[in-house]
Image (cartoon, grey):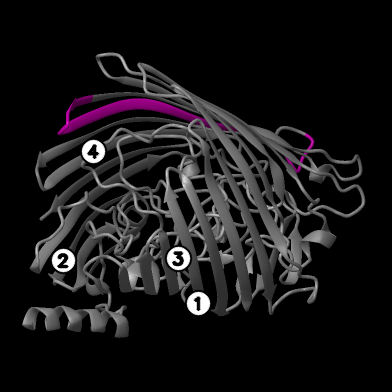
Amino acid sequence: MRRLLGCAFVFGSLLCAPSSVCAQSAAPTGTPPAGSPSASPTASPSPTPVPGFHLSGAAFADFVNTATSGSGTNPPEGAGFANGSPLSPNTPYDVWSSAPLTPGVAGLAQLQLTGSEVGSRYDVSATLGFGALTGSMQNVLYWGSNLLPTFNSHIGATNLPYAISFPMHAGQEDTSASIVSPLFGSFGAHDGSWQLRGGFFDMVQSDRFVFVQSPFTNVSPNIGLQTAESLGNGPAALDSWPAVEPGLPLHGYDFVGKQGIAQLEVTSAALPALPGDSTRANIASLVFDHGEGTRYSFSYLHVWTGGTPIFTTTYYGADPHATPGPQGNLQSSTLGGQSETIAGARAAVHLSPATDGVVEIGQTWYNADMVSLPGTNRPGGFYHVGATAHHHRSTLELDLWRFEARYANAILPYGTPENVWSAGWAWPGVWLKSTYQLVDNTIAPGSNRQGYRLRYGLDHGPLEFHAAYSTFHQIEPSTATNMQQVGFVDGFFLVQADPGATLGTEHQYNAWIAWHPSFGDLTLDYADDTMFRPSVPTQPVDAVTYQAPQVVFTFAHTFSKYAVADAGYGRYAMRGTWAQTFTNVDYSQSTAFVGAQLAESRGAAILIQLRRAVFAGLPSAPNDPPPNFAATTFILEQRYGF
């Protein structure tokens, strides 16, 4: 009973004060139990615990060392960009992830302890986090494992004195900090029929066209490299290595209940937000899972923001501007007091032993207090129909999408302003620059697009092959009139004058080929994105035509279930015109990598990776110094579990 009361007391403290953190402290994260903070990957499933008190823990230690050289390490736009300017620097960042590549050495150690009392009728648990870091904040925040939620600047924690910077030498943005903080607690029926959770947690179920957790801004340590739209199975990894969590955690309360084939989840939580701002959401989902691929679900989300108005790359907020520059007419405005409701229904049906189908329908209602044209908001919709056919080793898929400009359009910055670095030319970056959409915009190019994707897969043999082709068109032009209407969002094309408005088109070509000879695994991962928008002769600034080819070659060898290693090379390029009549976008990054994972014992494993990146290309503005630079990054991570 004392142990049960002790766990209940810790759980109660989580609900009352989930952010109890030491000043100037830093918190890393180990491997949380199922449903606990997304601070780090979840551990492998463990056997059903016997009744009584159990204490478990997971820890990791990271070491990151980055060295850089070249004129691109000090971009002319850097100082303004760090202070919120919409003009993006071309460098120094990793084009594969948009994470900064700046010099520094950093060390990070994190531990999570979980105490649980397993009873005959009820189970209760609580998780406490400990952590410390020293050295380069930028390298820890972007190239180490995800920090504990109570210490993570990307979520809005203010324990670290972090601000975006372009250091020329190691040590210019170093700090030391530590933290002890409660993270998570749960109480529920022993048979799993219901569970109440509080603190930092991941969602149990969610339809991704209604809600997804905010994406990571750090690069989760791994030993490989892949394209953002990869059709492959991910970088090589040991089966025992923890999987990457679904996103940054929510902070609040969550209830999950099951009966028969039905499962209900109800959540009230804070989403990641900038310091001084707040974003809260109420979420509910009901799922009926019949098994064998037949599943029906209904989802609801209501989100609202408060606090300091935000400067955004949208055009419908207060005081809208389209600032001329070498990267085009960059739109911006100030936005506050947003409110959005999304409702959706999904049906996935196993039509026959060889075919599956899916239908998804969503609707959005959005408004905001600080806007230039009040009363111009109206609902937006999301529609998806897909079919999949299987025959032996082959799979053929066809998907049709319509993602309207007013669907899932809340603007939600988080972390440090401008903490998600992006290329010049990646504009307007509504969800590229420290902002995310509430829904998954990787399934299609995002807002204001409709089109289709055709995909083929050949699996489970010595030679595997995946290929896909997609084409998407703008639904409405990005005119000044449209983009000043409340909630109108277009993902990439800049604002244009109403006379002579045009519509853009995007194509995606993807392929993944894997050969599995006796001496290892050879893979080729390829993607090519093209974007085109014509312009009338009087408005050449509206012209967009470029392509971004990406390719990664990898050789991996699994020595045993305790050791795997790989080596490879990737190249990412972009070339074309953006808001000009001549080629003004031309750059590439080559990245070579080698890595390994070793299981040292049942509870300990280590990861090592070395990456060498070389960037070269045209500057963002004429007469600026070239953005060329090189960076070498060494990452070591050791994990423990008990």
Residue 85 seen in this snapshot: yes
Query: Label 1 belongs to which residue?
Result: 278
* Disc 2 secondary structure class: strand
Query: Label 3 belongs to which residue?
Result: 415
Q: Identify the magenta region.
A: 558-581
Left or right placement of residue 228 versus residue 469 in this view: left
Query: How many residues crowd mark 2 within 10 Å: few (<14), some (14–19), many (20+)?
Result: many
Query: How many residues crowd mark 4 within 10 Å: few (<14), some (14–19), many (20+)?
Result: few
Quarter of the image where one finds residue 498: bottom right
Q: Nearer the viewer, residue 286 or 74?
A: 286
Query: As shown in the figure, which amino acid type bears the numbered disc 1?
Result: Ser
Which is more N-terminal, label 2 or label 1? 2
Residue 575 seen in this snapshot: no
**Farthest residue, direction top:** 518
Which is more N-terminal, label 4 or label 2? 2
Which is more N-terminal, label 3 or label 1? 1
Q: Nearer the viewer, residue 254 or 545?
A: 254
Query: How many residues crowd mark 3 within 10 Å: few (<14), some (14–19), many (20+)?
Result: many
For the residues labelled 2 and 4, say whether their Cβ atoms are less than 8 Å apart: no
Query: Label 2 belongs to which residue?
Result: 113
Viewer-nearest of discs 4 and 1: 4
| Quarter occupied by the C terminus | bottom left
Query: As shown in the figure, which amino acid type bears the numbered disc 2?
Result: Leu
* Disc 3 secondary structure class: loop
Query: Label 4 belongs to which residue?
Result: 239
